[in-house]
Image (cartoon, grey):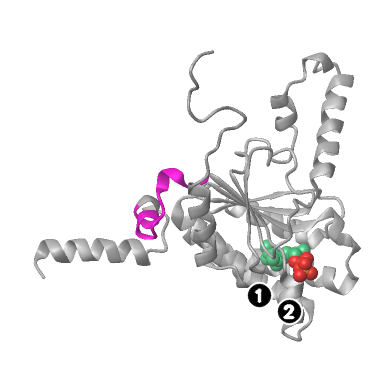
């Protein structure tokens, strides 16, 4: 092989094997993904952990344990691809109805994950964020969330956002309370409230809206997830359960997203004037 051939082969090899986020464009192309047609923000309802475990004769918590590995895999791949934000539904406000041992396990897993993940977040330049109600979460989990947020605050790559103790309706209630309090203080005129004021009062203030919402394990519902923000998200549901969701399935979702014609209530092509 000549020098030019070697250099070309080496650059292709680097793009495929690199774990850094410096060349997301080349990396995406090397995976058959058109960078310009990637979503800025991917949101995921990670479902099916329990069924995955029970089908294998194991306790449901093994599904969550394996699910945490999938979180790492998908997060790193989104960072490599140059996706701006990944928002994962880790615990809903409704999930508190589950048995205490499962909830205790989920809290311990979350805390462990946040402590263990820092090298991966640093290596991939990932910023960490959380949305949801703080009230109700154990103090040690809150402390770990705050440490991880601070530790990654200066990172400029993917924003990994975990929805923890999150509910779309709860978020809207909290936003209404904030706006109402401002109105009472005379800081805002109720008649002048616009969509942007509501958006700025949500937990997700300053974040882009999801372009793609992925749901695993086949259920066709949105389960109180990002109700305001997914108004124009493209939906993609797979029967694959979260512990089995991997890079290939993520690429399948992204390739499908790339085929979507997003009209946001308008028309794709100009129609002749009537
Ligand atoms: C839904 O599956 C999953 C959850 C309620 C928890 C998600 C948690 C993880 C993926 C692991 C921990 C997360 C992080 C970020 C470390 P399910 O239990 O409802 O499954 P089922 O519908 O089959 O019962």
The label nearer to you, 1 versus 2, is 2
Taking depth in this image into account, of 95 and 38 the one nearest to the observer is: 38
Which residue, as the protein is rendered here, is positioned at the far front?
Answer: 274
Residue 82 against residue 271 in the figure, above or below: below
Where, quadrant-wise, is the C terminus in this rendering? top right
From the image, tell me which residue sits under label 2: 53
Query: If the picture is divided into quarters, which one holds ligand 1?
Result: bottom right
Residue depicted at x 77% and y 76%: 61
Residue depicted at x 73% and y 55%: 220
From the image, tell me which residue sits under label 1: 66
Q: Are marks 1 and 2 in contact (CB under 8 Å)?
A: yes
Where, quadrant-wise, is the N terminus in this rendering? bottom left
Determine if the C-beta at disc 1 is less than 8 A from ligand 1: no
Residue 136 against residue 245 in the figure, above or below: above
Alpha carbon distance from label 1 to label 2: 9 Å
> In screen coordinates, is 122 left or right of 238?
left
Q: Position of residue 181 (x, y in %)?
A: 87, 26
Q: Residues within 10 Å of mark 2 (few under 14, many from 20)?
A: some
Range of residues picked out in magenta: 26-39
Examine the image and state in which quarter residue 7 appears: bottom left
Q: Position of residue 25 (x, y in %)?
A: 37, 50
Determine if the C-beta at disc 2 is less than 8 A from ligand 1: yes
Q: Position of residue 131 (x, y in %)?
A: 72, 48
Is residue 96 visible in this depiction of the protein?
A: yes
As helix, strand or loop, the secondary structure at mark 1 comes to helix
Is residue 116 covered in magenta?
no
């Amino acid at each position: 092989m000549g020098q030019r051939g070697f250099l070309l082969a080496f650059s292709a090899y680097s793009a495929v094997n690199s774990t850094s986020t410096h060349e997301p464009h080349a990396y995406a192309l090397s995976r058959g993904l058109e960078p310009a047609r990637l979503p800025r923000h991917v949101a995921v309802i990670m479902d099916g952990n329990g069924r995955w475990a029970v089908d294998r004769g194991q306790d449901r918590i093994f599904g969550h344990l394996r699910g945490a590995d999938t979180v790492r895999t998908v997060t790193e791949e989104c960072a490599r691809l140059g996706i701006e934000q990944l928002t994962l539904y880790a615990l809903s406000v409704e999930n508190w109805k589950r048995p205490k041992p499962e909830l205790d396990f989920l809290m311990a897993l979350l805390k462990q994950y946040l402590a263990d993940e820092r090298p991966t977040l640093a290596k991939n330049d990932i910023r960490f964020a959380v949305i949801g109600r703080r009230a109700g979460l154990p103090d040690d989990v809150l402390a770990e969330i705050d440490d991880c947020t601070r530790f990654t605050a200066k990172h400029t790559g993917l924003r990994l956002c975990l929805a923890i103790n999150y509910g779309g309706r709860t978020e809207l209630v909290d936003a209404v309370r904030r706006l109402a309090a401002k109105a009472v203080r005379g800081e805002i005129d109720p008649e002048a409230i616009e969509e942007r004021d509501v958006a700025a009062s949500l937990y997700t203030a300053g974040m882009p809206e999801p372009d793609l919402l992925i749901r695993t394990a086949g259920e066709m519902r949105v389960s109180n997830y990002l109700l305001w923000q997914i108004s124009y998200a493209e939906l993609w549901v797979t029967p694959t359960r979260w512990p089995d969701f991997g890079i290939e399935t993520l690429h399948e979702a992204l390739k499908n997203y790339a085929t979507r014609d997003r009209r946001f209530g308008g028309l794709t092509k100009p129609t002749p004037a009537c």
